[in-house]
Image (cartoon, rainbow, N blue to C red):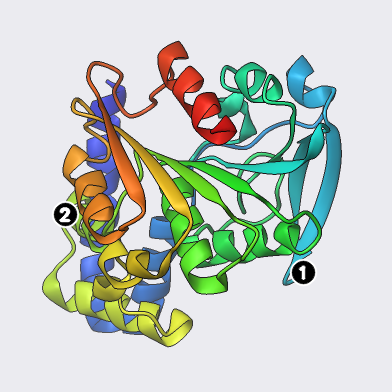
């Protein structure tokens, strides 16, 4: 029943936007972009945090007038950043965290814009990378671990801001080409070609980046930090081919293939390999 309602809702939105783009193209574009960048879930309640987050040291940062939340577990001078994916939050690191604590390093997890306890209604990789930079200016990360779109934001951050303190990065089920995500959205809502062009134009005007160029092909080669990519053959959210492409362009990266773990990659053997990689 839920799937049926979701199908009807998305198709209704798409039909409305397609009609609106001929009557009020600017309004249609803003609506389509808002739906594309607005997460439907992933928020947390500050009064109902799970114990491992409630006990962490919390600190808020400001990114262009919006507050975003971080959580810190103190260790030695080496610092690990954790970056979750779309419609998620720092909760996703609960099972990995004990393994990282065993490394003895300081761990800082970030709730992405519009997720967890962070403010905002809009999410995009560029804003996420800017949030990473805000925290990095105070806590210089040596290692970055990102899942899904958090992995893409990690790589984009390093390519854009070129942080010299970053030694290693771990990307879990991360997409390579933003155009694929965008195309899936267009297909989901069955947006017409006129509407698709309008959103492309809006993206360029707002970020000065073409959707087609927002790909690991165009920036991964500039990242000199070492990389470890995990991707599951059975991932239906972000296909395995995405990490293969990133690995091809990111010359200092290694691709680790798993099977049967899906997109989440929540697995004890994966956690052990991540910890061992950071300690090498």
Q: Residue furthest left?
A: 193
Front in this rendered view, residue 256 or 52: 256
Question: Which structural element holds mark 2?
Answer: helix
Image x and y of residue 221, in percent: 33, 67
Q: Residue furthest top?
A: 268
- Is disc 2 surrounded by few (<14), some (14 to 19) or many (20+) residues within 10 Å? few
Q: Is residue 253 visible?
A: yes
Q: Nearer the viewer, mark 2 or mark 1?
A: 1
In terms of image quadrants, where is residue 91? Answer: top right
- Using the image, tell me which numbered label, if any, was put on residue 261: none
Residue at left offset 29%, top offset 65%: 215
From the viewer's perspective, is residue 66 above or below residue 268? below
Residue at left offset 18%, top offset 63%: 191
- Is disc 1 surrounded by few (<14), some (14 to 19) or many (20+) residues within 10 Å? few
Residue that badge 1 annotates: 65
Image x and y of residue 150, in percent: 48, 47
From the viewer's perspective, is residue 219 above or below residue 106? below
From the viewer's perspective, is residue 98 above or below residue 65? above
Q: Is residue 49 visible?
A: no
Residue that badge 2 annotates: 187
Front in this rendered view, residue 269 or 236: 269
Residue at left offset 35%, top offset 49%: 253
Question: Which structural element holds mark 1?
Answer: loop
Left or right, 154 with respect to 81, comes to: left
In terms of image quadrants, where is residue 111? Answer: top right
Total marks shown come to 2
Front in this rendered view, residue 173 or 14: 173
Pick whichever of labels 2 and 1 is earlier in the sequence. 1
């Amino acid at each position: 029943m839920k799937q049926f309602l979701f199908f009807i809702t998305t198709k209704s939105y798409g039909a409305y936007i397609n009609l609106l783009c001929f009557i009020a193209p600017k309004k249609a574009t803003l609506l389509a972009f808002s739906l594309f960048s607005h997460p439907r879930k992933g928020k947390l309640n500050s009064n109902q945090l799970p114990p491992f987050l409630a006990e962490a040291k919390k600190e808020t940062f400001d990114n262009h007038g919006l507050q975003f939340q971080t959580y810190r577990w103190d260790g030695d001078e080496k610092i690990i950043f954790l970056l979750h994916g779309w419609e998620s939050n720092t909760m996703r690191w609960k099972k990995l965290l004990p393994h990282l604590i065993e490394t003895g390093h300081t761990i800082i997890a970030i709730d992405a814009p519009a997720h967890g306890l962070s403010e905002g209604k809009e999410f995009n990789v560029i804003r996420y990378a800017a949030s990473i930079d805000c925290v990095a200016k105070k806590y210089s990360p040596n290692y970055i671990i990102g899942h899904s779109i958090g992995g893409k934001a990690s790589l984009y951050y390093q390519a854009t801001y070129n942080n010299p303190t970053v030694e290693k990065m771990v990307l879990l089920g991360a997409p390579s080409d933003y155009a694929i995500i965008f195309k899936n959205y267009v297909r989901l809502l069955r947006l017409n070609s006129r509407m698709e062009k309008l959103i492309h134009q809006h993206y360029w005007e707002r970020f000065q980046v073409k959707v087609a160029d927002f790909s690991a092909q165009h920036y991964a080669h500039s990242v000199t930090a070492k990389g470890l990519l995990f991707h599951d053959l059975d991932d239906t959210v972000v296909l395995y081919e995405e990490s293969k492409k990133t690995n091809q362009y990111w010359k200092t990266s290694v691709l680790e293939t798993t099977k049967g773990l899906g997109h989440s990659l929540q697995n004890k053997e994966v956690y052990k390999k991540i910890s061992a990689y950071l300690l090498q």
